[in-house]
Each structure stands twice: as structure tokens, then as C-alpha cells.
């Protein structure tokens, strides 16, 4: 992988990066607008969705699961707690650990908005056939795994 890239290869990589970034932004803009129409910001929705689908989570691990800096988690948890969508629960076996747990009110809320959320995503992604979606999933996984494992050369 250390061979020198041609101008054409560099241009193609830059073009892919730009197209991927623009597609991501366009999709997220639509999804975020729907979430905001329900009175949440995207991060609040992500936390609520995580707790709904995965159950109670240690506060210290939520940021990593939704790709958010740990300092911001406390703020988001406070806002969701104020709305009575989640509660903090102390770990009975380790006083250093506090869990976030979705409340009945939070469950009812997410259940009322999640169907329109997943339908919106489906509509946006309906530009691709089922086969194209499968291909995109595999290619983007490959790209993501490579990027996660990528180690720049010393000259970078």
C-alpha cells in the first residue's frame, strides 16, 4: 500500500470523499429535521434510541456508543432526565458506576416517533435497490474498518 498514487487515483479518492461527505450531510439533514420536529436534538435522540434498543447503559460508556465526547454526555443526560425520558440508576455493586435507564415516559415517546424516523430513513435510501444497499453496506464497512485500522506513515 506504500506505492505512490497517481494524480488520477488521488483525484478519484478526493471525489469519493466529497461525494460520501455530501451524501452523509444530505441524509443527516433530513433525519435531524424530523428529530427536531419532535423536540429533541440528534444527540438526545441517539441516547434515547440507544437506551430503548439496548437497555440501561453505564453513563461512562454512552458517549463511545453514540460517538459523542464524554463531557457532553452529562449535559444530554440532564436534559433527558429533566424531560423525564430517562433516570439515573446507581449500580448496586459498584458505587463508581451510574446507569442511564429509559423511563416508561421515554419508552412511550420513542415508540411514538420511531416509526416515522425509520420510515423517513427508508424513503431517503429508497434511491438504492435492495442489492445496491447490500453492496453499499459491504463497501462502507470495508472502508470503515480500514480507516479505523489505518496507521499513517511517519511522513504524515
Image: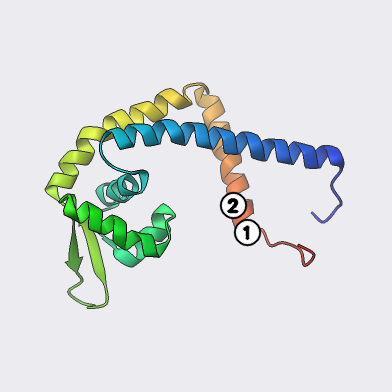
Residue 83 placement (x, y as % from top left): 17, 49
Q: Residues within 10 Å of mark 2 (few under 14, many from 20)?
A: few
Q: Quadrant of residue 148?
A: bottom right
Relative vertical location of residue 25 with respect to residue 59 in this rendering, above or below: above
Q: Is residue 32 above or below residue 86?
A: above
- Give residue 23's quadrant in the image: top right
Q: Which quadrant is home to the C terminus?
A: bottom right
Element under disc 1: helix
Circles 2, 1 touching at the beta carbon (< 8 Å) = yes
Q: Position of residue 57 (x, y in %)?
A: 28, 60
Position of the N terminus by quadrant: bottom right
Q: Residue at x 56, y 45 (%)?
A: 141
Identity of the residue drawn at 61% across and 39% down: 139
Q: How is the image coloured?
A: rainbow
Q: Which residue is depicted at the point 68% across and 62% down?
A: 151
Residue density around tag 1, few if under 14, some if 14–19, many if 20 or more, within 10 Å: few
- Where is mark 1, residue-wise? 149
Which residue occupies the extreme left position in the image? 104
Q: Position of residue 64 (x, y in %)?
A: 42, 59
**Mark pair 2, 1: CA separation:** 6 Å
Viewer-closest of 95 and 55? 95
51 or 24: which is nearer to us?
A: 24
- Residue 104 visible in rendering: yes
Q: Nearer the viewer, residue 12 or 82?
A: 82
Percent across and percent down for residue 21 are: 59, 39
Residue 102 shows in the view: no
Query: In the image, what residue occupies the spot 23% across and 40% down?
Result: 110
Q: Is residue 97 left or right of residue 137?
A: left
Left-right relation of 126 to 21: left
Along the line of sight, the residue nearer the viewer: 25 or 50? 25
Name the residue carrying label 2: 145
Amino acid at each position: 500500500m506504500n506505492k505512490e498514487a497517481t494524480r488520477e487515483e488521488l483525484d478519484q479518492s478526493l471525489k469519493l470523499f466529497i461525494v460520501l461527505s455530501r451524501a452523509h450531510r444530505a441524509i443527516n439533514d433530513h433525519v435531524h429535521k424530523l428529530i427536531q420536529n419532535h423536540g429533541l436534538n440528534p444527540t438526545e435522540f441517539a441516547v434515547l434510541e440507544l437506551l430503548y434498543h439496548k437497555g440501561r447503559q453505564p453513563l461512562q460508556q454512552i458517549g463511545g456508543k453514540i460517538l459523542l465526547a464524554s463531557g457532553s454526555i452529562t449535559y444530554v443526560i440532564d436534559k433527558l432526565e429533566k424531560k423525564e425520558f430517562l433516570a439515573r440508576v446507581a449500580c448496586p455493586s459498584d458505587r463508581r458506576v451510574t446507569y442511564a435507564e429509559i423511563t416508561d415516559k421515554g419508552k412511550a415517546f420513542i415508540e411514538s416517533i420511531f416509526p416515522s424516523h425509520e420510515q423517513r430513513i427508508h424513503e431517503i435510501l429508497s434511491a438504492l435497490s435492495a442489492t445496491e444497499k447490500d453492496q453499499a453496506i459491504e463497501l462502507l464497512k470495508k472502508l470503515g474498518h480500514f480507516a479505523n485500522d489505518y496507521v499513517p506513515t511517519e511522513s504524515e
